[in-house]
């Protein structure tokens, strides 16, 4: 894993733990609520995390009211 900011580490840890429990689909709003961040903070960091975090495959899945992400552990 390359150098991550504190917020990126929180988001990556949350996604990793959730994916390990079998969850695969996430919304930035729900991640933000769980971590005490804003949806904007989470949404801005997800594209960077997709490139920085090698243990997770983060893919934009769909866009309806908010972006849904598909996260798969590698």
Image (cartoon, rainbow, N blue to C red):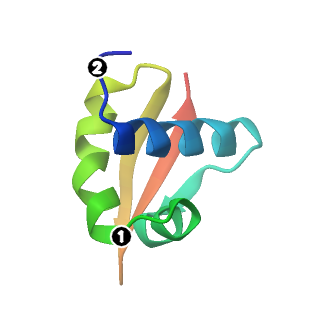
Q: Quadrant of the C terminus?
A: top right
Residue drawn at (27%, 48%) of the image? 45
| Sooner in the amino-acid sequence: mark 2 or mark 1 | 2
Q: Quadrant of residue 19?
A: top right
Q: Do the CB atoms of the residues marked 2 and 1 lie less than 8 Å apart?
A: no
Residue 9 in the image: above or below residue 67 = above
Residue drawn at (35%, 70%) of the image? 39
Q: Position of residue 33 (x, y in %)?
A: 52, 71
Q: Which mark is residue 3?
A: 2
Q: Is residue 74 left or right of residue 39?
A: right
Label 1: which secondary element: loop
Q: Quadrant of the N terminus?
A: top left
Dot 1 corresponds to which residue?
Answer: 38
Q: Position of residue 49 (x, y in %)?
A: 32, 36
Q: Which residue is at the front of the view, 22 or 52?
A: 52
Q: Quadrant of residue 6?
A: top left
């Amino acid at each position: 894993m390359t150098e991550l900011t504190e917020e990126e580490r929180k988001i990556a840890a949350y996604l990793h733990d959730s994916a390990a429990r079998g969850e695969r689909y996430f919304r930035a709003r729900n991640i933000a609520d769980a971590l005490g961040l804003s949806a904007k903070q989470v949404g801005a960091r997800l594209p960077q995390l997709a490139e920085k975090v090698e243990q997770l495959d983060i893919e934009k899945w769909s866009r309806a009211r908010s972006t849904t992400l598909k996260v798969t552990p590698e």
